[in-house]
Amino acid sequence: MAESYDFRSVEQRWQERWEREGTYRAANDDPRQKYYMLEMLPYPSGDLHVGHAKNYTLGDAIARTMRMRGYNVLHPMGWDAFGLPAENAAIQRGIDPATWTRSNIANMQRQVRLMGTSYDWSREIATCDPEYYRWNQWLFLRLYEASLAYKKEAPVNWCPQDQTVLANEQVIDGACWRCGHAVERRNLSQWFLKITAYAERLLADLEGLDGWPERTRTMQRNWIGRSEGVQFSFAVDGIASHLDVFTTRVDTLYGVTFLAIAPEHPIVAALRGIISKKNAAAIEKFAEGLTSKSDLERTSLMEKDGLFTGAYAVNPLSHERIPIWVTNYVLAEYGTGAVMGVPAHDERDFDFAKKHALPIARVIVAPGEEAEAPLTRAYVEDGRLIASGDYTGMSSERARTMIADRLNAMGIGTTRVNFRFRDWLVSRQRYWGTPIPIVYCEQCGEVPAPDDQLPILLPANVPITGEGSPLARDPAFMTTTCPRCGGPARRESDTLDTFFESSWYYLRYLDPHNTSAPWAQSLAAKWMNVDQYVGGSEHAVLHLLYSRFFYKFFHDRGWVSGAQEPFQRLFHQGMVLANGEKMSKSRGNVIGVDETAETNGVDAMRLFLLCVTPPEDTSDWTDEGINGRVRFLNRVWRACEPSLERARAISVRTLPPVSNAEEKALVRAVHIVAKSTIDEVTSCRFHFNTTIAKLDELVNAMTGSAQRMPDSPALHYAIATLPLLLAPYAPHVAEELWERLGHSTSVHLERLLEPDERALALDEITLVVQVNGKIRARIPVAPGISEEHAVALAHADVNVQSQLDGKEVRKRIFVPDKLLNIVVS
Ligand SMILES: [Zn+2]
Ligand SMILES: [Zn+2]
């Protein structure tokens, strides 16, 4: 009776040994081709469940496969350790954020190791370490010097729950991305990064990212929101000020029947001189009602509303007087804060005009259309112009050029490109983050901290109450001297958005202990860019956009070279449900990594996470499913264990002799698995679920053969090669079998089994190879083999090689499925 598989002792033993021997260390001076495999670094929230495990298991299977394909694989891990949950724990439970974070990191690091992942722990980082955030501050100062970091007062998103501002990208459907509370607007002086300076490049370079999910590229394109149009000004009756508008549809200029402006538009103050007191008071009241409304509420959720100011603008071409309205849906910070209203050709304007009984003037008709029945909805397509002065009869496209030229000639308009996205707001009024390295001096104003004062340490023992900025209440931190004049100064009390840290962490892994630079350029040149990135799709326009911006800045500074994009390929893994339901603490259905490892074993967990669906799909964790994987590993053990001694003599790099159909089928099953693994990584599909299904078939076949033909060399070959096939997915059992097969070095540093076409062939025919008409070889091949493939096999044959050596091939005669004759001189 075979001994049963004891996963607990096997898994623990190998994890300790891999760690002790540094099996997965990536050497910077390794001359082999590099492969940088990265999973998005986790936030240390406490405990890992099988949803997290799916992400790391997928990344690990890819890393292990690439390592076994002969690449020098860099596969690091670290912690996105600053941020609000630590501070909220401090508020709710009185725990120091640093203590909370450190203990969570320790626990999660233990759990990530428990999953048998092949990380190079010598490169581990935590973004809350002063050695890390020192370089965060250093990078902020470089952005500041390049005028890409600036402070300005602006209406910003405020989360009342988290008591801090948020970037536009962190407001999801009008709510805070972290806590879900409705976001308000406040006018505050905040730090911004000028990501919009990179708008064109961020957009254009998306084209080259064909290894990214198309959906994610589209989301970034839409978020950046490029539009080409004309910006021009309307004169305002009775005052000297102009109203600027931007439009992509200047061909509809004769159809403008109102101008819509934001109530915060600066022209409102100038209008007070020419409008009635009653109107002025009404506008003020209207504006007050909107101050705390978020962008989303104003542009999407609220009903479109407005108020006639009593003032008029003048259409620069038709000279018509156009009423000026303040509206809730035009935002001061987007575009010019004023929009021309063309009800006949814009849906929103159409609704607004209907509601407020404004005229609807049709100026575009569909090609071939003459009828001018009243519109029941806006006609938004291009067409032919009507009722448009000199431009009547032109196509929309031509009219756009002609009218733009005219406005340009009049000196009131220019063609330009607009972007929808705004600069990135990076200051936060919270404690647990990187202090912004700026001081304020009464004499000198805003002064950057000198590099030699970095890191500006986050002070310990600051009372955290959840109200106001904790750092601002710490006089020891706030009081400093001006680096420029030596006079009294105070520090910036805001900290950086944690997305600042995560925008460059992938470079710190290359050189985690560097004390003179965030990373050495030579190491960036060696390792970048990331070959395969794996993480959640929720970061499509957050982390993934910010990182691309940073990387382009680094490229401009010469700190990185090669590709201008940090992540060559990107994969979003699907989530894991528990018995059909979303896992949550409140439901009490979270499947933890610890319990699963203890009950079922890590290899079973890994196999199940990989086999249940393609990795991009949502998968469902079921008891039945995980038990199936436990049984699979027991079958593996039972099929191999009794014959391990005899399989020791087998060479895994040579096909065994086969003497019957069962043996042939068994060897073929081995190579089907080998081929599937390579296919899934070379195609970057990573559908290891199909590979594991083939592993199931192989192990079933081995189980049968072990009964029927225990002495078969084909069975012993399958046993000898199985660890190579299992290694990326079930690394512990693979290593255990490998050792018991008599190997003294790790299976994870071996080469994968190369799929052999001869083994894969369903049937074989014998191809006769002649050199100058003399038979030199008989090669078993698949029927229908191509000439090219036959030539390659012939040239690989030792006997043929010796006949060809040093001679020139003059001619080849190929008779399909029969003969290859090579004529040499
Ligand atoms: Zn919030
Ligand atoms: Zn000063």
Image: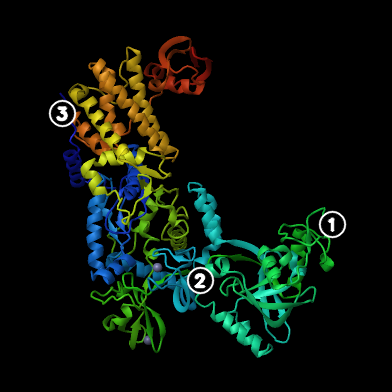
Identify the mark nearer the N-term, 3 or 2.
Answer: 3
Is residue 506 positioned above or below 797 on the image? below
Residue bearing the label numbered 3:
3
Q: Camera-side residue: 369 or 563?
A: 369
Judged from the image, the quadrant occupied by ligand 2 is bottom left
In this image, 342 relative to 463: left or right? right
Is residue 769 positioned above or below 465 on the image? above
Q: Camera-side residue: 458 or 222?
A: 222
Residue at 42% in and 20% down: 761
Q: Residues within 10 Å of mark 3 (few under 14, many from 20)?
A: few
Residue bearing the label numbered 1:
370
Assign the N terminus to one quadrant of the image: top left
Residue at 74% in and 60% down: 376
User: Which mark is nearer the camera, 3 or 1?
Assistant: 1
Q: Amino acid at mark 2?
A: Ser
Identify the mark nearer the N-term, 3 or 1.
Answer: 3
Q: Amino acid at mark 3?
A: Glu
Q: Secondary structure at mark 2?
A: loop
Residue at 45% in and 79% down: 189
Residue 694 in view, yes or no: yes
Q: Secondary structure at mark 1?
A: loop
The picture places residue 61, in percent across and down from the top left corner, at 33, 41
Q: CA distance from mark 1 to mark 2?
A: 43 Å
> What is the number of callouts on the image?
3
- Quarter occupied by residue 348: bottom right
Q: CA distance from mark 3 to mark 1?
A: 89 Å
Residue bearing the label numbered 2:
294
The picture places residue 444, in percent across and down from the top left corner, at 41, 86
Q: Amino acid at mark 1?
A: Glu
The picture places residue 438, in percent across and down from the top left corner, at 37, 78
Q: CA distance from mark 3 to mark 2?
A: 66 Å
